[in-house]
Amino acid sequence: MKFNGGILKLTRILIVLAMALALAGCRHGNSTSRAIRPPVDPEIVKLTKEQIFERGEQQFAHKRFQKARGYYTYIYENFPNDALARKGLLRIADTFYAQGDDVSLVEAQYKYRDFLNRYPGSENADYAMLQIANVSYKQMQKPDRDQQRTHEALEKFTDMIKTHPRSPLRPEAEKKMQEVLDRLAQHEQIVAHYYMKRKTWDAAVARLNTIVEQYPNFTGRDAVFFELATSLDALGRKGEARLYYERVVSEFPKSDYAGKAKHRLETRKAA
């Protein structure tokens, strides 16, 4: 019995040692796999970093974004202190942005933020900030839907312009920011239409006044002025209504609403 008990104890020790060795081997194997990544191209080791980056650019140009990302990632991970590595990280973000689906856009925004966190003084920081804003811009909903992403885009374009006021990318940021503001104004206008259809004129006037005050460059101001005049008319505020009809005629003479506004004004004179 003692002999059998000794064998059993020895067997247990051997099993424990075998498990320990196997675990150590797994850890060693994992660390090796992390340290040595398989190259995207078997010939990549023969290329200079500039040639590798150029291959990534070629793949990007042909919209093979995943393959392009492989080359950029190789540059970033194997030449971390090189200027080309910084550019590689930015191009990794660009591949996700170019793919354009919801998941890729989230990843793109994360990568652009990562770039800014790592290289805040980079000459491409303005571009990274613009792209962060562009992600929110792409995620905007239609005017009749929730406008959370639109507000986020406005905030991010504003941040980019304030942080880099002399950036050559500022005109693009300002152009898109105006589109964002128009989207928010359109949302307010849709709500105003809802109130007008239900003849809740006070609420309609409040919404339309919001557009006039907060979105002075809204491209649909001619319609807003006419609708505001109509709502004020319905409330019996004839003097205020007349002023907005006159603004439609004087400020937007070629608008379809100008003829309608003239007709309303002439009707008043005839009465």
Image: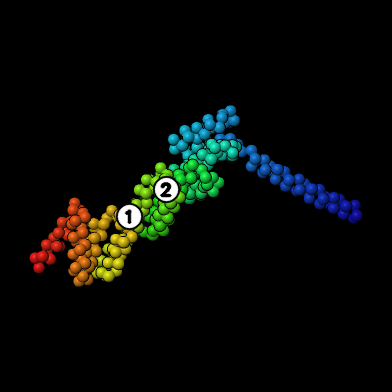
Q: How far is the residue under mark 1 from the one under mark 2?
A: 22 Å
Query: Label 2, on which residue?
Result: 165
Q: What residue sits 28% from the left and 63% below the top?
A: 208
Q: What residue sits 14% from the left and 59% below the top?
A: 262
Question: How would you rate the neighbour count of disc 2 (Cα within 10 Å): few for under 14, some for 14-19, many for 20 or more?
Answer: few
Q: Earlier in the sequence, mark 1 or mark 2?
A: 2
Q: Is residue 25 left or right of residue 40?
A: right
Mark 1 or 2: the one toward you: 2
Q: Is residue 166 left or right of residue 189?
A: right
Asked whether residue 78 appears in the rendered view, the answer is yes
Q: Amino acid at mark 1?
A: Asp
Query: Label 1, on which residue?
Result: 182
Please say if 39 is above or below 213.
above
Q: Quadrant of residue 249?
A: bottom left
Q: Secondary structure at mark 2?
A: loop
Q: Position of residue 251 (x, y in %)?
A: 21, 55
Question: Residue lying furthest left in this view?
Answer: 270
Question: Residue lying furthest top in this view?
Answer: 46
Number of numbered labels in the structure image: 2
Q: Position of residue 166 (x, y in %)?
A: 42, 45
Q: What residue sits 72% from the left and 43% below the top?
A: 25
Q: Quadrant of residue 147?
A: bottom left
Camera-side residue: 212 or 113? 212
Camera-side residue: 128 or 7? 128
Image quadrant for the N terminus?
Answer: bottom right
Question: Residue lying furthest bottom in this view?
Answer: 236
Camera-side residue: 56 or 49? 49
Q: How is the image coloured?
A: rainbow
Q: Position of residue 165 (x, y in %)?
A: 42, 48
Q: What residue sits 58% from the left and 35% below the top?
A: 39
Q: Secondary structure at mark 1?
A: helix
